[in-house]
Image: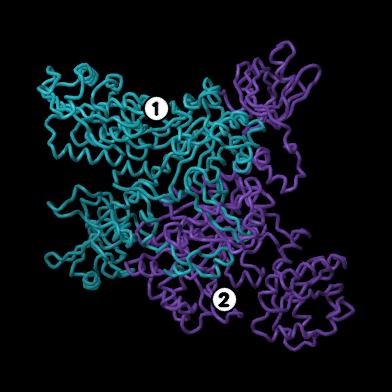
Chain colours: A purple, B cyan
Amino acid sequence: MRTCYSGLVSAAHLDQVVTLFGWAHRRRDHGGVIFIDLRDREGLVQVVCDPDRAETFKVAEGVRNEFCLKVVGKVRRRPEGTTNAGLISGEIEVLAHELEVLNPSVTPPFLLDDENLSETVRLTNRVIDLRRPAMQKNMLLRYKTARAFRRFLDDAGFIDIETPMLTKSTPEGARDYLVPSRVHDGQFFALPQSPQLFKQLLMVAGYDRYYQITKCFRDEDLRADRQPEFTQVDIETSFLTETEITGIMENLIRYVFKDAIDVELANPFPRISYQEAMTRYGSDKPDLRVTLELVDVADAMKDVAFKVFAGAANDPASRVTALRIPGGASLSRGEIDGYTEFVKIYGAKGLAYIKVNDVTQLNEAGLQSPIVKNLSEASLRTVMERTGAQSGDLIFFGADKAKIVSDALGALRTKIGHEKGHVDGRRWAPAWVVDFPMFDYDEEDKRWVACHHPFTSPKDEHLEFLETDPGKCLAKAYDLALNGWELGGGSVRIHRADVQEKVFKALGIGDEEAQLKFGFLLDALKYGAPPHGGLAFGLDRIVTMMTGAESIRDVIAFPKTQRAQCLLTQAPSPVDEKQLRELHIRLRNQVKADA
Amino acid sequence: MRTCYSGLVSAAHLDQVVTLFGWAHRRRDHGGVIFIDLRDREGLVQVVCDPDRAETFKVAEGVRNEFCLKVVGKVRRRPEGTTNAGLISGEIEVLAHELEVLNPSVTPPFLLDDENLSETVRLTNRVIDLRRPAMQKNMLLRYKTARAFRRFLDDAGFIDIETPMLTKSTPEGARDYLVPSRVHDGQFFALPQSPQLFKQLLMVAGYDRYYQITKCFRDEDLRADRQPEFTQVDIETSFLTETEITGIMENLIRYVFKDAIDVELANPFPRISYQEAMTRYGSDKPDLRVTLELVDVADAMKDVAFKVFAGAANDPASRVTALRIPGGASLSRGEIDGYTEFVKIYGAKGLAYIKVNDVTQLNEAGLQSPIVKNLSEASLRTVMERTGAQSGDLIFFGADKAKIVSDALGALRTKIGHEKGHVDGRRWAPAWVVDFPMFDYDEEDKRWVACHHPFTSPKDEHLEFLETDPGKCLAKAYDLALNGWELGGGSVRIHRADVQEKVFKALGIGDEEAQLKFGFLLDALKYGAPPHGGLAFGLDRIVTMMTGAESIRDVIAFPKTQRAQCLLTQAPSPVDEKQLRELHIRLRNQVKADA
């Protein structure tokens, strides 16, 4: 067996004969001597092959990049001036006594040090890509992060219980991945979108505290931060209130960040209501490091001549909002055009703004903007006072349906905040977002839909709104936001069958449909279900944030592309007709079967 | 929050006021006082509701089995003579000051104490079934077992890395579960039968030591110990020999048994060759607690008149074997008939036997059996000497194709061993079975098939047999047997592309087919793949053995039936036509779509 990992040989091994395994990271001839940087998962060590040892030297001459090697040699101090403080092995080198090629390598498709690889090249050659030290660091950090979650949860009495992968399709929420049944002709399993119902059943069954780090599946069109299969840290507990649950969960997250990347997060995490988050930041997962804030000014715009503002100001479903950029009067025309294009991604039709050249003159002399002449002095005064504008600032406006304004100006706030340095200097800014509404109104379908999921408990004092005014009903739901990302979310669940039935009713889910889809949950609630609640964290995203990677694909060993393909194994792929026959299915488009 | 779990209230809490949550396990009136056994996952505590506290008493009167309760009360010593040494809380009881029904329960479908429930009833009402203390113990033990695996592997430098669930179908070995792709018309993912190829790729990528506790899937007809989805502790390591790998693995298993159920397994585990295991025990996972052994006697039967024996004795693919049952001459005719029926399950046509009434008379006078007259005295002498027969014994015989004899007499050996007490008294008897052959000859398809899988390395000294005599080629493969079950198995893998190609050739897998199915592995082997090997343990089976449960379904929270159905959620189930259209598939048998 080896003495230790190559990357861990150090001055502590001086004068010892060590046995090492690894890969030739680099090989170079220098003054008749051959140097091989031997690499393994823990790092590099310099191996010296001297021509005096003819046999070893001859083997060394044949070594090329990525050859797999066994080295036996003596650890000695590096000559003065050649030490490398960046390596654990930086003070020493290994004089090879024996060198064995365990396996040669053809020339790799790219150099491991190359920083400019296309993602397609990397994913096609994922095995070589995974040898890159950056990827090894990511995989190791992912492991340490998951391990930290487990350790905390183990110590806190949570039990890891496995829930099924082959489950029932409930076409609600995202699209299911389906699995045809061979035994049951015409029937299908679905891969779980989350273990939500099973973890609730485990609470009803009295397991009290549950967790699982498990794969979930959603067959949706992919964005940069989504994968068809993703990993969730799934947690549920009984007999605790919303505050008690979020209290344990923030202890958990603090532990994980400390253990995995040695970061001390704030204690406690600030809590803001959904309403406040939307009003001030235009987002339910605000980046609180950004110091810019939205300010609503609809009340001052009801009678102005500028129809875009006045129209929105008089529509209860709309929002008129100002975003002050300190010093923003110096923004170039090009920059402002760029931001205008940017907000269009979120459905905004344009981006009105005022350059505040002289805040004491509330007219076209002091304020530079095509819209000023259509705004009253009173309305302008309100804007300036409420935003706290100073000469030299710029104010952007959003006026449209509330969702469009929040999305557009919320995203603009974050973008300008980071681009122009309107940030408070913190590296990590966690916050609980609480008091979510129970329901959103779907204008298209003309019905209420669940903001979280239909098993979320309403606030006790809002129970009556379920029947009278669902829009007013707040939920015992909470999300954990970090730097503008949602790390996880959850809720206290409904534990009373009668409340669950009322919520289904508010959602327009009839008794029959409820029984068909969720009968087993409704049944379970009748047998003394305990009060319970929980949360799920997205592991891929948390690790992505910790590493600073650009994509969650950089923290997944074998990810899918945005077209849901594995470039390494070429999955998905066509299958034999015999397999389809056994599953009682056929292709709709036979012609494409062997495409 | 609660003071502690109900099951953990003890004399240490005497005179304290405690807050408890749980379920009414039993309620009884006794002398005008109401006693409630409050149950949670840690056990029971006795709650006393006194009529003096009218409000609490009134609530208690309404309590029925499985009501979910909150209790605030004072811990006091139980009256003398009423303590219960079987409970942690057995010395105390809680005098209720407050009693709150958190959720009532309708009458449960069965009593939790009922030991005679059909499995269908249990699986249909799984949530209630999971409340039974026996099931809670099983789930907790499963968790502790998985946690013990993780702890050992974490400490030994193994990294948990997730491999994909949506992978490529390689119709080899068992049947795949398929997942139609929405994005790629006519193409399918497969759920993994094991992460075999991915873990090998991780070794090639330099991760050195990998593990994962993960779900695997096989769409096969189910036996008592099989599930469509099952959990594997999957392990792989680089740069170690067969002996080094099995050494670490048996340390792991010893740790897990000690940690989870406080059992000290043998150290070291005995090692027996596949050949010896088959010869002596007729099984590659022998139950070594059974003291009975098979003895081959073909050489003595080549010329006997009894055609069944002589025919098999002269066929190199057959086996003639004796199994001595000490004292077996007292077996009844009915018992022998029963064993004869039993061996037919394994393909045996009958079960010849000799009752040894007097071992000194090797003829029909001393030996009671219809076959004695057709056996020579020399052959009978060989049988008696080799088996060590004594007067009063019985000898069973198997004579048929080797596999049938081994299966039939191997199973009979175990059955009679346990039924008649021919066991050595050990509770646990682990053993490594090593030196497996690389290939089995498939008589039907007239070709060699891999005994383990096609990535298993041949013994170094047998490389040449790959081309000359595959049947002689032994593999660096090892299985861990315990009490007649296979706990896990693995091998050193092939790390050289040229050897892998030779093995594919021996298996009749052409270059094109190999490239199509395993191209990504063959490619990876070319880039300095390290020597590597590993193993996978079946978690479900290990926990089943630890609990002594009858079925692995008793250690899985939400298992499938033997018809691959979830009786709780009614999965699989029909799906919407829209879902099928999106996946570019249709049902073959439309009429059954809504069956």
Whether residue A215 is visible to the viewer of this picture, yes or no, is: no
Total tally of numbered discs in the picture: 2
Q: Position of residue A277 (x, y in %)?
A: 62, 69
Q: How far apart, in angstroms, are the residues tagged by discs 1 and 2? A: 65 Å
The residue lying toward the viewer, choosing from B183 and A146, is: B183
Residue A336 bears which disc, if any? none
The residue at the point 62 percent across, 22 percent down is A70
Residue at 29% over, 42% down: B345
Residue A440 is marked as: 2
- Quadrant in which the C terminus of chain B is drawn: bottom left
* x, y percent for residue A90: 69, 27
User: Is A545 placed above or below B160 here?
Assistant: below
Figure quadrant of the N terminus of chain B: bottom left
**Which label is found at residue B274?**
1
Q: Tell me: residue B297, above or below residue B101.
A: above
Which chain is mark 2 on?
Answer: A
In the image, taking residue A264 as reference, residue B267 lies left or right, namely: left
Dot 2 alpha-carbon crowd within 10 angstroms: few under 14, some 14 to 19, many 20 or more = some
Front position among marks 1 and 2 = 1
